[in-house]
């Protein structure tokens, strides 16, 4: 937003806490429930990032001023306070219906008082003005080997300026990436300013104090007859308490709220306390210095080159953990790309910035369609008969309650939800499995899952969250309509059971076969919410039927009472009797 070629006498940096980001609004998926756009874990990241930004601005002669209220009113008031010295106001455009409405209201309010406005799309890797110009250009660049036929003139578009380039944009990610790569090179990141013109401190007064997590999230726990996302009040309070502890600040009644972890996942309070004890800290979780150090360590330290990127557990060595910094704007996609693109072993991280761009520009193009139940599917599939997450009286259905509390009986799914509720984060692999169960097995309105993730994720991004949920629900950019078999997924991506054991204490000391298939093997384990057989690929189902075991490694050698060994011996004997041959391997 600050061009090095600009010349101005003063620069006032302001962040406005918009109450609509933290207030209850009616849920899209259930009219009897409320949703909230920014949750407690994302609030922790935001507050840490603002704290770091203020320190950086002060280091180069600037200051970060805080406002609390409607952005249109607050910025208009600030411009009036500054008088003729306020010549222009700049901000970054973000995708999303409410975000775009807010931007338009602020623009109109400032123009009405005679102030010049300049906005930019600054979060993607590629600049908006680098995108292909027309549908014909998009198609030619996406399919260079195809003979280009003269296409019918596109109907008039209500898009203007850079938005016109979104008309005709491919809906399939591979086509989009191919076209953009052919059209332009990603720009390099601009250097940060070393000095800023000082703000008019006398006119502005106090810069304002950062609020606490509890203050910002107070409305989530306010007494209300309407449930927040179908969660119990105890569950909501527990999530906020965990976020407050992670912030390094404290909840005044933390000892009392800690016990409410049982409301999130019965029987797992001890697990929550163990993990959160490690999370409590006196250092920031976010902010540009922290983000840049993490980027440097991950890429240049060698972890990015050897990362097991598809695993269920997103360890420090296997995942970049940069998503929250990108979501809040403390790190740019161009900084990531410039750091990772030049080495073939780390180029995957740079390519992820292109994937992120696809969802951002797709969200700008979709507008309201991004949030419709039917979405914008790129392929025709059998219509899903979507179910509500709520009963007629607005109480949550048993399926929704068990899915949101990590009590489905499916180990990988329950471990993922437990981690998400506790920390605001889980790996992309297990997010996909959570989405698959909700949308493909339970067929519950995918927007309910997206709204829950919106409130829980520390790295929530409107475009990525809603775009990915639509993708895996079969109403977005996925032409394949995938269905994840979660037990087979655990076998492949958590083969030793380390991830599940970490988050589900009841399985912590269990054998790998019980971790994968606890049904009838672990006392008190609940019946799965969906038939367990539907969560196996046909190959794994056949192996289980034949041998009694799922794991194919030495981990399965000692199973329950030798069950698998007996089945293998019996099957071997049958084969030998039938063929009259022995020992042919």
Image (cartoon, grey):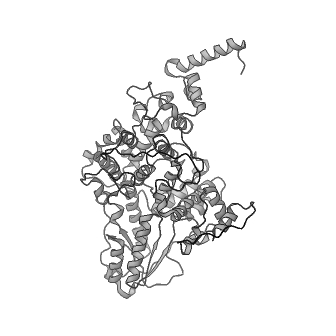
Relative to 119, say whether 425 is above or below.
above
Q: Where is residue 10 in the image (x, y as percent from the top left)?
A: 42, 82
Q: Which of 344 and 475 is in front in this view?
A: 475
Relative to 209, say whether 307 is above or below.
above
Residue at 37% from the left image edge and 27% from the top image edge: 524
Q: Where is residue 72 in the image (x, y as percent from the top left)?
A: 36, 74
Q: Residue furthest bottom?
A: 84
* Residue 190 visible in the shown view: no
Q: Nearer the viewer, residue 308 or 449?
A: 449
* Residue 34 visible in the shown view: yes
Number of numbered tags placed on the structure image: 0
Relative to 449, say whether 156 is above or below.
below
Residue at 43% from the left image edge and 45% from the top image edge: 444
Q: In this view, does 436 lie to the left or right of 179?
A: left
Relative to 304, say whether 130 is above or below.
below
Q: In this view, does 438 lie to the left or right of 79?
A: right
Q: Where is residue 317 in the image (x, y as percent from the top left)?
A: 54, 48
Q: Nearer the viewer, residue 176 or 255?
A: 176
| Residue 189 found in image quarter | bottom right
Q: In this view, does 70 lie to the left or right of 157?
A: left
Q: Quadrant of the C terminus?
A: top right
Q: Where is residue 282 in the image (x, y as percent from the top left)?
A: 36, 55
Residue at 45% from the left image edge and 56% from the top image edge: 459
């Amino acid at each position: 937003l600050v061009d090095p070629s600009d010349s101005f006498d003063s620069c006032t940096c302001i962040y406005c806490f918009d109450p609509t980001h933290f207030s209850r609004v009616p849920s899209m998926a259930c009219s009897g429930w409320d949703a909230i756009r920014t949750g407690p874990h994302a609030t922790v990241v935001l507050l840490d990032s603002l704290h770091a930004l203020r320190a950086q601005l002060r280091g180069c002669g600037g200051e970060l001023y805080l406002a609390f209220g409607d952005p249109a009113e607050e910025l208009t008031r600030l411009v009036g306070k500054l008088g003729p010295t306020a010549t222009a106001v700049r901000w970054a455009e973000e995708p999303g219906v409410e975000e775009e409405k807010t931007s338009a209201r602020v623009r109109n309010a400032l123009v009405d008082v005679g102030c010049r406005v300049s906005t930019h799309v600054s979060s993607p890797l590629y600049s908006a003005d680098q995108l292909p110009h027309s549908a014909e250009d998009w198609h030619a660049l996406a399919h260079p080997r195809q003979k280009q036929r003269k296409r019918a003139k596109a109907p008039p578009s209500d898009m203007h300026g850079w938005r016109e380039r979104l008309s005709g944009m491919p809906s399939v990610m591979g086509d989009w990436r191919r076209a953009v790569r052919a059209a332009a090179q990603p720009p390099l990141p601009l250097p940060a300013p070393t000095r800023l013109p000082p703000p008019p401190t006398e006119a502005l007064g106090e810069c304002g104090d950062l609020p606490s997590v509890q203050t910002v999230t107070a409305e989530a726990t306010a007494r209300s007859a309407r449930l927040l996302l179908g969660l119990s009040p105890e569950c909501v309070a527990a999530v906020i308490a965990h976020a407050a502890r992670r912030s390094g600040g404290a909840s005044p009644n933390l000892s009392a709220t800690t016990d409410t972890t049982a409301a999130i996942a019965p029987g797992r309070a001890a697990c929550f306390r163990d993990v959160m004890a490690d999370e409590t800290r006196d250092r920031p979780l976010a902010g540009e210095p922290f983000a840049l150090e993490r980027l440097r360590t991950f890429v240049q330290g060698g972890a990015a080159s050897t990362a097991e990127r598809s695993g269920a557990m997103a360890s420090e060595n296997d995942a970049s953990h940069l998503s929250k910094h990108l979501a809040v704007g403390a790190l740019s996609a161009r900084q990531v790309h410039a750091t990772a693109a030049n080495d073939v072993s780390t180029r995957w991280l740079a390519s992820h910035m292109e994937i992120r761009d696809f969802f951002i520009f797709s969200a700008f193009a979709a507008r309201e369609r991004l949030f419709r139940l039917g979405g914008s599917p790129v392929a025709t599939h059998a219509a899903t008969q979507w179910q509500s997450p709520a009963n007629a009286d607005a109480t949550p259905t048993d399926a929704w309650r068990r899915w949101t509390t990590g009590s489905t009986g499916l180990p990988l799914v329950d471990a993922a939800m437990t981690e998400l509720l506790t920390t605001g984060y889980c790996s992309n692999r297990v997010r996909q499995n959570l989405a698959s169960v909700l949308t493909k097995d339970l067929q519950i309105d995918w927007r309910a899952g997206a709204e829950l993730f919106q409130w829980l994720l520390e790295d929530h991004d409107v475009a990525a969250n809603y775009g990915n949920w639509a993708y895996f629900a079969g109403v977005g950019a996925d032409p394949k309509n995938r269905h994840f078999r979660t037990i087979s997924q655990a076998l492949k991506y958590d083969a030793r059971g380390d991830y599940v054991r970490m988050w589900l204490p009841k399985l912590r000391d269990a054998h790998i076969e019980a971790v994968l298939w606890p049904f009838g093997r672990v006392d008190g384990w609940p019946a799965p919410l969906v038939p367990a057989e539907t969560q196996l690929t046909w190959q794994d189902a056949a192996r289980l039927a034949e041998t009694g075991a799922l794991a194919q490694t030495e981990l399965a050698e000692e199973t329950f009472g030798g069950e698998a060994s007996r089945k293998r011996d019996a099957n071997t004997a049958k084969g030998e009797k039938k063929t009259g041959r022995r020992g042919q391997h």
